[in-house]
Image: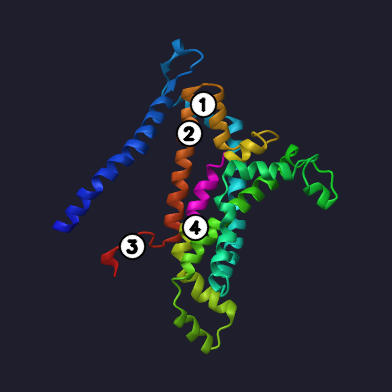
Amino acid sequence: MNRQQRLGWWLCLPAVGAMLLVTAYPLAYAFWLSLYRYDLRFPEQRAFVGGANYASVLTSEVWWQALANTVLITAGSVMMELMLGFALALLMHRTLFARRTVRTAILVPYGIITVVAALAWKFAFDPTTGFINALLNLDQPWLNERWSAFCVIIATEVWKTTPFMALLLMAGLTLVPQDLLQAARVDGASRIQRFFQITLPLMKPAVAVALLFRTLDAFRIFDTVFVQTRGAHGTETVSIVAYHTLIARLNLGLGSAVSVLIFAGVSLIAIGFIKGFKAPLIHREDSQ
């Protein structure tokens, strides 16, 4: 390690300390609480129980049902956002006229607070005051039935966060050399061949980052589900389970175990994406 590298580490030290203070300490405290039977309604019964809270959560049907719901919402919303995000990224990348206006208009939904977006979609699909049933000539109680509620939740997530996906993918599109695309066009490659054989492979790091960020965000979904259904009608997610256990029932031990399991799930998703894509998410000078 040379002098410049040592200086870099020293300059990063305050940021590392701040990160440890705001992330590592709460995680360590949550893990510590998860090893205790600690209910604020009965504080005198507090006792060390080891992994009993984790066993209780992992043998609960509520947890596995919530995990399946979370995976369903995550997979459905992220896949739709990827396809729509690609379309919007290509549109913004190729727009020649009013480029700033087009990009601003597309990014407006992402600037709206999640709770506000969830409320707007809830009112739109309300069977008495919403306009969706009148528009489709239906009498469907969308948020009172499980699968239709999932459709509304996923649609809200897609509408809200597709611009974020498009923004990351558009940044990846700017890294594709235009000379390479023109050379492929001269050689007779079709538009589809150029996209799948040149553009998409060169965008692999950008796609990996976009999918990673959105998958992690979608897996922790809370606001939209809480506003629209509060977890009723079989739409409960793992974050809703953690809220009900930790905040509503004041069971710190069991709720902390749920929170630690959610963190473990998020970590596994992140490791899986980094290993699966095998993309250089971190730039290293010695790789050049």
Disc 1 designates what residue? 246
The N terminus - image quarter: bottom left
- The answer to whether residue 230 is above or below residue 201 is above
Q: Position of residue 123 (x, y in %)?
A: 72, 42
Q: What residue type is labelled 4?
A: Ala
Q: Earlier in the sequence, mark 4 or mark 2?
A: 4
Q: Give the mark nearer the N terminus: 1 vs 3.
A: 1
Q: Which of marks 4 and 2 is in front?
A: 4
Whole-percent x, y for residue 207 in the image: 49, 62
Where does label 4 land, which residue?
A: 210
Question: Which one is in front, 103 or 31?
Answer: 103
> Are the residues tagged 4 and 3 within 8 Å (C-beta)?
no
Q: Is residue 221 magenta?
A: yes
Residues rendered magenta in the picture: 210-222
Mark earlier in primary sequence (1, 2): 1
User: Circle 2 is placed at which residue position?
Assistant: 259
- The residue where tag 3 is placed is 283
